[in-house]
């Protein structure tokens, strides 16, 4: 529908602007949306295990789940959002190098 395509366009432009800011090295605040986007990108590269970003006691945690979403283990907890984002982007880089 027309409304849906407009919303999709707005989301794409939002992420595009954030990506450009990140490439330019500008300070940017990491949001939950950014973590969700990076989580999806990492999960697209994984087969048997998935990562899930959770929020506990005012901090961020990265959990490992199986393909059905059942909890397996906590990878790391007690992070700020920017630390979690850095870890997820590092995991993504490693997985991309593995595929080459």
Image (spheres, grey):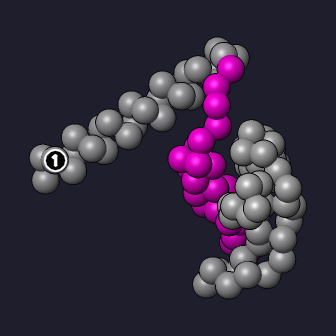
In front of the other: 31 or 11? 31
Q: Which residue in the protein does label 1 denote? A: 3
Q: Is residue 23 above or below residue 10?
A: above
Q: Which contiguous range is marked in magenta?
A: 27-52
**Residue 80: within the magenta?**
no
Q: Is residue 84 left or right of residue 8?
A: right
Q: Is residue 43 above or below residue 33?
A: below
* Residue occupying image coordinates x 74% and y 64%: 56
In front of the other: 23 or 14? 14
Residue 2, x across and y down, in percent? 12, 46
Residue 44, x across and y down, in percent? 61, 60
Q: Helix or strand or loop: what does disc 1 sit on?
A: helix
Q: Is residue 86 left or right of residue 52?
A: right
Residue 86, x across and y down, in percent? 78, 41
Q: Is residue 100 above or below residue 29?
A: below
Q: Is residue 85 visible?
A: yes
**Residue 34: within the magenta?**
yes
Residue sitting farthest toward the left = 2
């Amino acid at each position: 529908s027309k409304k849906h395509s407009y919303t999709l366009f707005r989301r794409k432009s939002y992420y595009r602007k954030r990506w450009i800011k990140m490439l330019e090295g500008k300070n940017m605040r990491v949001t939950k949306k950014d973590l969700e986007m990076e989580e999806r990108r990492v999960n697209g590269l994984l087969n048997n295990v998935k990562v899930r970003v959770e929020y506990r006691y005012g901090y961020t945690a990265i959990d490992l789940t199986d393909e059905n979403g059942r909890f397996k283990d906590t990878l790391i907890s007690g992070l700020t959002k920017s630390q979690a984002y850095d870890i997820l982007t590092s995991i993504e880089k490693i997985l991309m190098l593995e595929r080459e």
